[in-house]
Amino acid sequence: MEQILRRWAQDLVSRYTWLTIRFEYSEKRGVYLVSYSPSEKIDESESFARETMEFENRMNDLYDDNAPLFCDEEELFKLSSEAEVIRYHTPEKVDQHSVPKKKKSSLAAAIL
């Protein structure tokens, strides 16, 4: 279940770059807890709402009472500081001028 949630969350944040998803397993409840943020952006995105609702319904159909619990901004439960955080990361640009040049090996230097 953890891998399913992680892959799904990574896919979502790659398409909704404003999104942050936090999740963790709750021993007390016996299920995963998943929280989306920021709620302002969530409220503005019909496609996000539709897509997450479909996923949540599939999880409920498959796992019944063991399905994860989902909410926005931890409004239904509080996650611990240990919860996994998944958000969009922009790829770092490589500055060609700052990339160190490879040194020639001593053998190559001796040949030259």
Image: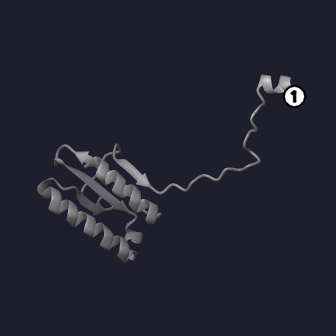
Q: Residue furthest right?
A: 112
- The image quadrant that residue 38 belongs to is bottom left
Q: Residue at x 15, y 62 (%)?
A: 61
Which quadrant: the C terminus? Answer: top right
Residue placed under numbered mark 1 in the picture? 112
Neighbourhood count class around disc 1 (C-alpha, 10 Å): few under 14, some 14–19, many 20 upward: few
Residues 43 and 57: in front is 57
Residue at 57% x, 54% y is 91
Instruction: Pick whichever, 46 or 27, lies toward us.
Output: 46
Asked if residue 50 is positioned above or below residue 8 in the image, the reply reads below
The image position of residue 37, as x and y in percent, is 38, 62
Give the farthest residue toward the front.
Answer: 111
11 or 108, which is in the foreground?
Answer: 108
- Identify which residue is drawn at 80% across, 27% down: 108
| Residue 8 seen by the camera | yes
Can residue 79 be seen by looking at this rendering?
Answer: no
> Is 7 placed left or right of 1 in the picture?
right
Residue 32: % across, % down: 24, 51
Residue at disc 1, secondary structure: loop
What amino acid is found at the position of numbered circle 1 in the picture? Leu
Q: At which x and y percent is residue 35?
A: 31, 58
Q: Indicate the position of residue 28 as horizontal and vertical percent values.
A: 17, 45
> Left or right: where does residue 57 sit relative to residue 3?
left
The residue shown at (22%, 55%) is: 68
